[in-house]
Image: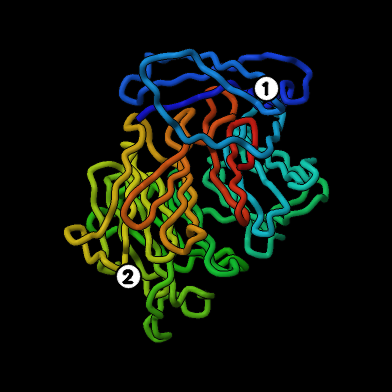
């Protein structure tokens, strides 16, 4: 796979030429192969205005390659000093962007004005690993490297205190998922457990581990709709809210994806297996989209999958040198297939269109050099990419 990077200020160059501020400018573009990233080709592209149209030209050559590129609509540099963004989230109403840092601070930004709307200093003792905002857009949860999950108000008030603190797991928490409106939520851990919590009491409702290997580290998870569990067969009783018809897919370090009934507290039949660690999971309708440590993106049609030997799936091999840790999946506007945005190592961000049988992809460019993605999020039709120092909308 060819990886394309382009000069970070190329949009400013195009604007300068189109406005007549300068008659001729150049921008650089680089290309490298994922199988040999040490060697990189550089190209100079001339930009000029001709008959009121921007003309971009590159040196003549015997070979012509075509790449589909997409450019940012807007960019926000957060300007953090002495820290990097380590986690991020967009509120469900699309109004607030929340960023956590590797020093444990949490910042809230107004998406419309791009101004700082709130700040929580020392929300965690170390890196903020995950952030999620509840459906009301008024409450958020943060997960820290300190093995704590905290519930906070989304507010501009100075120095807010956590409403609840949740702590049970003994190793790094790798993922968090909110059930329904947020009365229940799940946290996954490298200690091999997934814990179901009741939010208002901060009590553990139940704990899940893979029967075949109780200590297999959990790397990611995703919720999906499933068969309703009868009240007499649930585990958790009065502490369950909106869980009765929920399945969860759990990804493990040894390459297994196992499905569980949340309310029934049992493993269901579907189990998918590869030899590479599962690094991301997303569910959209009938499709389960899995990213792996070896750069493979696999789309499963779960309605046609019985077990690991009878699974309908399609593979898209990305850069094999890096895991697919961040992804966002939406239903295509046509109603058929998916639009997947996935990050695959430094400087590779792809928009992949899957029509139910084939993949077509374009590269999202225009981020800072050597960017590393910490969130691929969406609000309506807008895609938000958060890197270690900026937020970009496509």
Secondary structure of residue under mark 2:
strand
Counting from the top left corner in percent of width and height, residue 188 is at: 44, 53
Counting from the top left corner in percent of width and height, residue 191 is at: 38, 48
304 or 92: nearer the eye? 304
268 or 58: nearer the eye? 58
Quadrant housing the C terminus? top right
Describe residue 183's horizontal placement relative to residue 346 as left or right.
right
**Residue 50 numbered tag:** 1
Q: What residue sits 60% from the left and 69% below the top?
A: 181
Q: Residue at the left extreme?
A: 309
Q: How many marks?
A: 2
**Residue 33 numbered tag:** none
How far apart marks 2 and 1 lie (CA) works out to 67 Å
| Residue 85 seen in the figure | yes
> Which is more N-terminal, label 1 or label 2?
1
136 or 175: nearer the eye? 136
Q: What residue sits 27% from the left and 45% below the top?
A: 254
In the picture, residue 202 is in which quadrant? bottom right
Which numbered mark, 2 or 1, is in the foreground of this view? Answer: 1
Describe residue 2's horizontal placement relative to residue 394 as left or right.
left
Quadrant housing the N terminus? top left
86, above or below 65, in the image:
below
**Residue at numbered disc 2:** 266
8, above or below 206, in the image:
above
Secondary structure of residue under mark 1:
strand
109, above or below 312, in the image:
above
Disc 1 packing (10 Å; few <14; some 14–19; many ≥20): few
């Amino acid at each position: 796979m060819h990886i394309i990077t382009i000069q970070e200020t190329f949009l400013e160059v195009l604007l300068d030429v189109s406005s007549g501020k300068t008659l001729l400018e150049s921008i650089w573009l680089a290309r490298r192969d994922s199988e040999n990233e040490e060697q990189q080709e550089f190209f100079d592209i001339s930009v000029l205005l001709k008959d009121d149209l921007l003309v971009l030209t590159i040196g003549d050559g015997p070979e012509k390659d075509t790449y589909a590129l997409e450019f940012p609509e807007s960019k926000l540099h957060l300007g953090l000093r002495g820290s990097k963004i380590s986690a991020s989230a967009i509120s469900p109403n699309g109004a607030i962007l929340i960023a956590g840092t590797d020093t444990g601070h949490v910042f809230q930004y107004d998406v419309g004005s791009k101004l700082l709307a709130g700040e929580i200093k020392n929300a965690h003792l170390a890196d903020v690993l995950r952030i999620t905002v509840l459906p009301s857009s008024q409450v958020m949860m943060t997960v820290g490297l300190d093995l704590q999950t905290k519930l906070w108000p989304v507010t501009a008030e100075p120095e807010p205190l956590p409403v609840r603190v949740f702590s049970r797991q003994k190793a790094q928490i790798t993922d968090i998922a909110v059930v329904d409106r947020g009365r229940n939520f799940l946290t996954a851990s490298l200690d091999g457990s997934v814990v179901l919590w009741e939010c208002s009491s901060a009590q553990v409702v139940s704990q899940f581990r893979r029967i075949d290997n109780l200590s297999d580290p959990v790397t990611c998870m995703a919720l999906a709709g499933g068969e309703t569990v009868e009240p007499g067969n649930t585990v958790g009783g009065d502490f369950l809210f909106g869980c009765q018809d929920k399945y969860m897919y759990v990804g493990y370090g040894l390459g297994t994806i196992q499905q569980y009934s949340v309310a029934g507290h049992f493993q269901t039949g579907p189990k998918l297996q590869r030899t590479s660690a599962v690094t991301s999971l997303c569910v959209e309708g009938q499709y389960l989209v899995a990213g792996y440590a070896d750069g493979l993106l696999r789309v499963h049609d779960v309605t046609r999958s019985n077990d690991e030997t009878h699974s309908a799936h399609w593979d898209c091999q990305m850069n094999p040198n890096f895991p697919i840790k961040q992804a966002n999946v939406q239903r295509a506007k046509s109603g058929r297939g998916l639009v997947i945005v996935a990050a695959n190592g430094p400087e590779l961000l792809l928009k992949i269109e899957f029509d139910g049988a084939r993949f077509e992809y374009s590269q999202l460019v225009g981020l800072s050099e050597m960017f590393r993605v910490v969130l691929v999020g969406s609000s309506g039709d807008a895609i938000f990419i958060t890197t270690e120092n900026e937020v970009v909308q496509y």
